[in-house]
Each structure stands twice: as C-alpha cells, then as structure tokens.
Image (cartoon, rainbow, N blue to C red):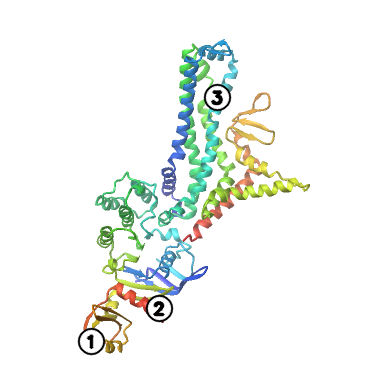
Amino acid sequence: MSAIVEARGLRKKYRNSVALDGVDFDIAPGRIVGLIGPNGAGKTTALKAILGLTTFSGELKVLGLDPMKQRHKLMHDVCFIADVAVLPRWIRVHQTLDFVEGVHPAFSRERAMHFLSRTKIKMESRVKELSKGMTAQLHLALVMAIDAKLLVLDEPTLGLDIIYRKEFYSNLLNDYFDEERTIVITTHQVEEVEHILTDLMFIKDGQITLNATMDEVAERFVEVMVSPDEADEARALNPIHERSIFGKFVFLYDNADPLALAELGEMHNPSVADLFVATMKDGDDA
Amino acid sequence: MSGLSPVSFSTLLKREFWEHRGAFWTLPLGIGGFIVFVTIAILTALATVISEIDGEKFLLTNAVARIKEIEPDKLDVLWDLNLLGSSAIYHLVLLFVLFFYFLGALYDDRRDRSILFWKSLPVSDAVTTISKLVAGSLMAPVFWVTAIALMHIAMMIVFSVLFLASDIPVYQYLWGPADPIRMWAYLLVAYFVQAFWLLPVWGWALLASSFARSKPFLWAVAPPVLIGIVYSWIQATRLRIDWDYWRIIGERLLGGAVPISTDFSDGTVRVGSLRFTDDDVVQAPATWSTLFERFATPDMWWGIVFGVVCLALAIYIRRFRDDS
C-alpha cells in the first residue's frame, strides 16, 4: 500500500537555525507514529509542513497532495489538534458542531454528539467557560467525528491532568483508530503513549535519529542490569548508554548478541523514555 | 473549489455573526432603543413639566398642531427628512464598527491561536477572507438597516400617539405622506453601493489585520497619516502638487451613497435624495439610478482596484506566513 506521508530531503531553515536538515521518511497507512524529540528539534516544523502550515524545500507528499499548494483540499482527509488551547474562546459548543458540520463533508454530527454525551460538556457553554480538560474532550470529539485518513496530534494533552490524559488516549484508541487510519503524535509525555504506538521516530537537531516499528525496537534494543564487578565486561560490549540504579548498572545495547548479554545479568526491553534519553545523550557526547 | 459551496459559505457568514453578534445586531438595536427612549423622555417632559418657554405659555399639543401649517405637498419631504435624519447616527457608528471589525478579522484568531483550528478545516484562506469581507460590508448593513427600520416603526408609533393626543389626523399627516418602506429599500441599495465605495478602506484594514504581528490599528492608520504629513509639508513649500490628498481620504470615508454623505464636488451635504445647499432644501431627482451613478466615476473604480489588490495581499500573507 502506498505511503500516507512521503518526505524526501525535507528541509526548513529559519533565520538563524535549521529546523529540518533534509530528512527522508515514510509513514504507512494504519500506523500510530510517535514523533519524539527535544524542544526545538524540528518535530513541530515537520508536522506543520505535513499540514501545509509552513513552507519548506525538498519533496513532501501527503495523501498524494502537495500540502502547501493544496492545503484546503488536504484538510478533507487530514485532521489535526495543534494543542488544547486553540478552540476559539468565544464560541459555544453547539456552534462548533454547526460550524464543522457546515464546512466539513465528512463530519458526522451524531458521532460527535455520542462522544460528547459521555462528558459533562453542555451544548450552550462557551469554550472559555470550559476547563482545559473539557476543551480537549470537545476538540477530540469534533475530530473523531470526522472520517479522516490522517490525524495529526501536536502535544494534544499538554497541561491536562492525568485523568484527562489517560482518557484522551484510550478514547482515541478504542473509538477512532482502525487499520484505515493513521495517527501521528508528538508529545513530551512519552510514557503515556508508548503502549499505543506502532512506530517510533526520534528527531534531533533536524535529523531523524531513529525510525523503526515498535517490534523492531523491541528486537534491537536491550537493557541489561549488571552488578558493579561485571561493569567493565559489559562496557566492552559497546553499550550505547549506561546509568546506575540501586548500586547496579543498567546498560543499553543496540543490536548486541543476546547470548553474550544474558551472561551479564537480567535482560529486559527499555522503555521509550529511557531509549529516548539514551539516544539523545549519545549525540551530545559525540 | 469545494470551499465555495453555498452551504459552507453561509456557515462562514454565520460564524462571523456568532462572533460579532454585538456589533452586527445588538448595537444597532441599542441605538434605536436609545433614540426612542430619548424622544419619549423629551416629549413627556414637554407635555408635563414645561409650561412656558421664553415667558410664553407652551402647550405641546398646540406646538404639534402647527404641522397643519405645512403645505400638504411638503409633508413627504418632512417625513423623508425625519426618517433619514434619525438614521444618520447609525451610518457614522457603523463606519467605526466596521473599521474595527476588519482590523480584527484576520488578527484576533492569530492572537488567540484559534487560527490553527480554523485552518484544520477544509476551507481555503481566500474563501475565509472573502467571507469576512462579505460579512462586514454586506451582511452587517442588512442587520443595521433592519434595526433602523425597527426604530422607524417605533418612532412612527410614538408620533401617532402624539398626533392622536393633539387631534391631528394620523393618516393624513403621517402614514399617508411618509414612505418608510421606500426609505428602507433605498438604504439597502445605498449600503450595497457603499460596500464598493468603501472597498479600498476595508481592503486596507484587512491587509493591516493580516500583516500586523501586533497593533493592527497602528499599521492601518500610521501609513496614510504619515503620507499626509509629508504631503502637507510639501504643500507648505512652494512646490505645489496637483493632487488633493486629504480631500481624497475625506471623500472616501465620508462620501459615498449612504445618507448624510458629503458631496465634495459642490460642497453640499446630501441626505439621501435630498440635497442641502446653504439656504434651502433642494430635492434632487430621486431616482434609484442616482445611487448607481458612483459606478460611472473613475474614483469608484480606482478604489475597487486598490481594494482588490489589498485583499489579495491579505490572503497571500494569511496563507503563507508562519507565525510561530
């Protein structure tokens, strides 16, 4: 099946920094991709380019369209939540439904009403009267009621409390996602999304440092807990990162021989957060 | 272009109304309420409190009865004047309201970042911008004329009561000669023409609204004022320019087709079909075509060209500028 997003040599320069330094990547249909990177690494620029909100050089096709030239056409099949605070504050809840219904042919009012019926949001309320969590629920209800092929979420749960964050992702997974749809998420709260991701993309200084499926990640990366007296032996196997915990060392390996590692100590899969920290640090040392 | 379907365009207009209900509808209703209230208050005061003016005995009903002294064929002019005169304040307020509406139209949603929500929907920036132009220059005046009509009806009821109390035949002196429906139709057509006359002003305001990273008012007002200062300075020297800058600006803002507009060409003030010269009321030919005469002037078309250029730039900036 053809890719939803195809980027070749995607490049974006701001006045005094390079946000994207000629990156290549594909996003296949039916995936949930986590785009993870430190602030200023270029994630938001990449998403903006995909959404036709910024100019760029290089090649980029989203659903076969040029996002810069055909933005409003693209928006028939692409939805995005930029962050929780972007719904206009003056608008009433029922007006958001009227508006999206009026301009979006693929919007189902019934679906939106169904999602909203599970919340405490009142139809007559203005957005400015809603809490941040409720605003996010409303935005998600609007977006989930649109039959789109690609959903882009840029820090969608920033500033929400934990209950809303968990619910946000479980709604997304249970009521929205299927093999026809593709979701791209950026977030700082990696640990909350890692169990729903199918693909992982790390971005750093405008470069993609990791682009793999979660299965590949599980195969490639192994953490081993080693007692101090075996630490030198472990270091000899070229770990990409080490940290100490409770007097023991934890070494992270990329594509190491599992048999050799098993002799050192207990093996397990690293969390995305640990993997992220390790790969980001790695570059700093170099 | 799918964004131009009638359904989504009417949704965009509705959106503007939701956001600006106060400026588009509540405000003109309020002005009407105020005019009617003040009229009733003054009449009540004249009828009850005041018994003499300048030492002479005063009775409101007697004063009102003097309408009988007016020649019958001048009564329609009297009521035209009354209806137009009471609507004058609306035209001036609407000019300010619309100027600020357009200054905010492409700026407010960038400031509160809701532009990212609007841009997540399949509507092009061109259609969005045009919907705002149409909402301000054509839709808002329809609401305002409706509010003016409601005020006229209320005022005519107040006058009817006054006439009945003063033993004046209401139909003969008021409802017969007055022709409010023609007046409202006239206002609607006048505002339609005015939308084109003011297109350069609205286009300029939209451009400032789209361009400014902050303070769109300053961006809109400072350049024409600075040009004016330079112009006046050059004029003050011996170097004469055959080009009256301030008159062009003044004529654009205060001229046009709506009532109480100034005709700079002969220095007369026009109230609708009526034309005031120094000493008398002169009735100009009250044909509908006089409203459209503006379209025959080069000023109108230069203005439209300027307005369209500003509009295109405003759309371009909104489309391609990355604000973050």
Mark 2 residue crowding within 10 angstroms, few (<14) / some (14–19) / many (20+): few
Q: Residue furthest right?
A: B238
* Tag 3 and tag 1 share a subunit: no
Who's the residue at 48% across and 16% down the image?
Answer: B162
Q: Residue furthest top?
A: B57
Vertical comparison of B270 with A17: above or below: above
The disc labelled 1 sits on which kind of residue? Leu
The disc labelled 3 sits on which kind of residue? Asn
Who's the residue at 58% across and 22% down the image?
Answer: B77
Where is mark 3, residue-wise? Answer: B82
Q: Which mark is residue A284?
A: 2
* Tag 1 and tag 2 share a subunit: yes
Question: Is residue B284 at least partly visible in the picture?
Answer: no
Vertical comparison of A114 with B171: above or below: below
Mark 3 residue crowding within 10 angstroms, few (<14) / some (14–19) / many (20+): some
Helix, strand or loop at mark 2: helix
Pinpoint residue B55: horizontal percent, then vertical percent: 57, 11
Q: Is residue B267 left or right of residue B111?
A: right
Helix, strand or loop at mark 3: helix
Helix, strand or loop at mark 1: helix
Query: Which chain is disc 1 placed on?
Result: A
Pinpoint residue A85: horizontal percent, then vertical percent: 37, 55
Where is mark 1, residue-wise? Answer: A264
Looking at the picture, tell me which residue is in the foreground, A179 or A8: A8
Query: Which chain is disc 2 placed on?
Result: A
Distance from the alpha carbon under mark 3 to that under mark 1: 99 Å
Looking at the picture, tell me which residue is in the foreground, B99 or A71: B99
Distance from the alpha carbon under mark 3 to that under mark 2: 80 Å
